[in-house]
Amino acid sequence: MAEPVQFIRTFQSDNDPELHRARAAAATVCDPEVPVLTLEDLGVLREVGRGLDGEVVVRLTPTYSGCPAMHTMREDVLLALQSIGLVTARVEMVLSPAWTTDWMSEAGKTKLKEYGIAPPVGLAKSRGLFESESVSCPRCDSTDTSKISEFGSTACKAQWQCRSCKEPFDYFKCL
């Protein structure tokens, strides 16, 4: 495994056209578990820059340290970078700071709801650990819902049910 990259410049502070192209390509990669979200929507695309060796490096932060989708995300980002001619680019996983649903874009939250998954409620940084949630049904918008299980189809989601329309649904937990 390569040594951690020391960035000499980052996307946010540089006018390097290749970095802009790399960022744009990486931003289009979809989450393999929730394919309506891009890595940018999800907030896991953290940084694009150059290493000391001049190589383009994309940094991703997993939604949690054991996320099984990270290998696929890394490979999909590398394929996206290769498709624009960046065959020597690298992808790094960055665990600190830890990912939070606060990093999800508003567009991403809208896409989740339209897909039938209730988006995270509120800001994770302002919530208490065991604070109860009021989750709206993504189908009928009713707030008369109840949690069925702390875990849904992935560890990032919980299973809920709407008492109004009777439909079960995933809720992307506020982490």
Image (cartoon, grey):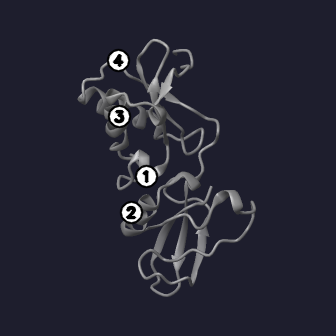
User: Percent from the top left, x then y, of residue 30?
Assistant: 36, 46
Residue type beneath disc 4: Thr
Query: Distance of mark 3 from mark 1, alpha carbons?
Result: 17 Å
Query: Distance of mark 1 from mark 2, alpha carbons?
Result: 9 Å
Query: Distance of mark 4 from mark 3, alpha carbons?
Result: 16 Å
Residue under pointer 1:
41
Which residue is depicted at the point 38% across and 49% down? 38
For marks 3 and 1, the one nearer the N-term is 3
In this view, 63 is above or below 129: above
Secondary element type, mark 1: helix
Secondary element type, mark 4: loop
Residues packed near mark 2 inside 10 Å, few (<14), some (14 to 19) or many (20 plus): some
Query: Distance of mark 1 from mark 4, alpha carbons?
Result: 25 Å
In the current view of this chain or complex, which residue is farthest to the top?
Answer: 53
Residues packed near mark 1 inside 10 Å, few (<14), some (14 to 19) or many (20 plus): many
Residue under pointer 3:
20
88 relative position to 170: left or right: left
Residue type beneath disc 2: Lys
